Image (cartoon, helix red, strand yellow):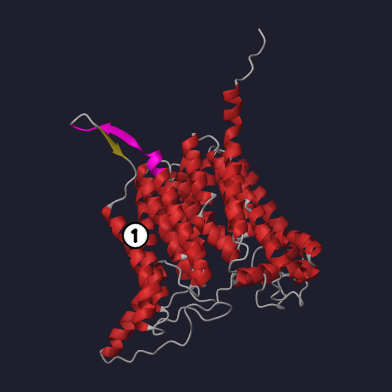
């Protein structure tokens, strides 16, 4: 007998996931295009300047140029990426890539060009999401797609404020997808590529190292050593292709100084909601109390938030914090995860472990940007659909993280945009989790009782507190205090959201410790 042809239903099913994902991407693209005229941060000019300097200058001057204050401080692969984009920018408008005349250039051509590049670069995110979800059932697929492809944080940070986080996180997701499939060599290769695009993703490097050593290299002297050499060779080749030209030019020290400007303060200009917020506030509180008690406490002249250049950790009472201290704290926070990765390296746990690593880096790292919460919020969306507890945790974390970046969009015209994006995201999460975890059970009377997605009363009170904080900052503070204590609303957001992020870190830590 001849081979039976697949039914129309089977053919449709085999193609529908890709088609549906493209529809998700198309809807997201429409929203991104509508955001073209919105506010742009200085990061927009940062990336335009990088287009100009990589196009106008020889490679030997890329990490030395100071024509603009926004000097190149990303690894070489991202510089090569900007050089590639500059080819098309020059064709559209040569002034975009002019080193002097292009400074602060803001014509419609440059705006549209850079906005479009951010959209197109999100294709790596789309591919990463597809690889991680292609073997899941349709309901879980669409839930995860809505959490990632329609992430309000990515809309705000990449397509209003302006950056390329979707592109970079997409590379991370591709790496995770290979690890979950057991293709460790490819997973390690892609992660090495990611580090050569943006070095701040290196926070997860200890987890990668322990996991790959145990899962890929371990198992007999000859086999283990040969695999270690193969993995080491692949990673070395990636870094050589990125940094090799600068090593040949004798500029490695200059490149490293640009990538790690430790003269910056422990916090960014807007305090990221992490552990150091509590440390800073404790120091200020103790200094105030001791002065009232008659002790001579000097007021530090250095800044917590030095941006371009600055001094480190100007505390009045508590011990000074250095980059080395934050490095040790991150490693200590990571240690339970590293132990688990060594003891039982499970591919299905790798996304959780990597997300936990980035949470540790966010909470205890040096000069952390509030936008870095994307590094763990997006990977955690992959596991949010696994259990009801995961969903409850993600629901709270996603809302808190999104709200914490509201200060990035400080102009009045963008206020409805960020609020609407967060509200729509919350509704989508609630409906998606309710559909995923719907359970119909019979009660004592024989009637069917519907149990859907609910969160605990503590989480509800905390989320209501976010509304209170926002009402205070937008209405009550200006009404009651006017221009006095103008920093207070931002400080309240940072402190309050820090409690939510700390809760997420503790929740993830407990989950990892209890896991088999």
Measured as percent of width and height from the top left, residue 368 is found at 50, 67
- Residue 324 lies left or right of residue 225; in this view the side is left
* Front one among 246 and 381: 381
* Front one among 238 and 65: 65
Measured as percent of width and height from the top left, residue 171 is found at 61, 51
* Front one among 198 and 484: 484
- In terms of secondary structure, where does tag 1 sit? helix
- Residue 2 lies left or right of residue 214; in this view the side is right
Residue farthest to the left, as pictured:
444
- Residue 170 lies left or right of residue 482; in this view the side is right
Q: Give the residues drawn in magenta, as a range.
A: 433-444
Measured as percent of width and height from the top left, residue 465 is found at 32, 64
In the displayed structure, would residue 438 be above or below residue 196? above
* Front one among 439 and 277: 439
Residue 49, by quadrant, is bottom right
Q: Quadrant of the C terminus?
A: top left
Q: Quadrant of the N terminus?
A: top right
Q: Residue at x 42, y 53 (%)?
A: 426
- Is residue 238 part of the magenta span, yes or no? no
**Disc 1: which residue:** 463
């Amino acid at each position: 007998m001849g081979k039976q042809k697949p039914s129309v239903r089977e053919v449709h099913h085999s193609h529908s996931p890709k088609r549906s994902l493209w529809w998700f991407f198309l809807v997201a693209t429409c929203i991104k295009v509508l955001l073209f005229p919105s506010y742009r941060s200085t990061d927009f000019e940062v990336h335009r300047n990088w287009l100009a300097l990589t196009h106008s200058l020889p490679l030997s001057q890329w990490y030395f140029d100071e024509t603009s204050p926004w000097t190149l401080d990303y690894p070489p692969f991202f510089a090569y990426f900007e050089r590639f984009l500059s080819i098309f920018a020059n064709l559209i408008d040569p002034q975009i890539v002019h080193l002097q005349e292009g400074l602060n250039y803001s014509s419609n051509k440059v705006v549209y060009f850079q906005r479009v590049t951010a959209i197109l670069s999100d294709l790596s995110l789309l591919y990463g999401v597809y690889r991680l979800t292609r073997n899941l059932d349709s309901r879980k697929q669409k839930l995860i797609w809505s959490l990632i492809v329609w992430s309000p944080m990515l809309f705000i940070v990449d397509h209003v404020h302006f950056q390329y986080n979707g592109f970079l996180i997409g590379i991370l997701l591709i790496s995770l997808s290979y690890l979950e499939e057991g293709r460790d060599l490819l997973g390690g290769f892609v992660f090495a590529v990611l580090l050569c695009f943006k070095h701040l993703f290196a926070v997860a490097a200890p987890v990668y190292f322990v996991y790959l050593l145990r899962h890929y290299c371990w198992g007999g002297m000859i086999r283990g050593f040969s695999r270690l050499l193969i993995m080491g060779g692949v990673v070395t080749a990636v870094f050589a292709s990125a940094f090799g030209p600068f090593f040949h030019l004798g500029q490695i020290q200059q490149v490293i100084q640009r990538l790690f400007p430790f003269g910056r303060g422990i916090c960014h200009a807007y305090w990221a909601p992490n552990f150091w917020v509590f440390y800073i506030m404790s120091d200020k509180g103790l200094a105030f109390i001791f002065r009232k008690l008659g002790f001579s406490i000097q007021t530090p002249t250095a800044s917590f938030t030095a941006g371009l250049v600055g001094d480190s950790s100007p505390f009045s009472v508590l011990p000074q914090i250095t980059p080395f201290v934050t490095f040790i704290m991150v490693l200590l926070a990571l240690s339970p995860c590293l132990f688990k990765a060594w003891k039982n390296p499970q591919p299905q746990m790798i996304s959780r472990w990597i997300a936990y690593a980035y949470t540790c880096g966010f909470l205890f790292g040096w000069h952390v940007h509030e936008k870095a919460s994307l590094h763990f919020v997006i990977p955690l969306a992959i596991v949010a659909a696994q259990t009801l507890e995961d969903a409850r945790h993600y629901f709270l974390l996603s809302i808190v993280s999104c709200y914490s970046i509201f200060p990035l969009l400080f102009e009045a015209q963008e206020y409805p945009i960020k609020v609407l994006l967060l509200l729509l995201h919350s509704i989508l999460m609630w409906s998606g989790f309710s559909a995923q975890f719907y359970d119909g059970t019979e009660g004592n009377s024989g009637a069917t009782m519907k149990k859907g997605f609910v969160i605990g009363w503590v989480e509800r009170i905390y989320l209501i507190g976010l509304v209170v904080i926002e009402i205070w900052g937008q209405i009550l503070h200006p009404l009651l205090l006017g221009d006095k204590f103008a920093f207070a609303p931002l400080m309240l957001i940072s402190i309050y959201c820090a409690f939510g992020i700390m809760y997420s870190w503790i929740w993830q830590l407990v989950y990892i410790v209890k896991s088999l």
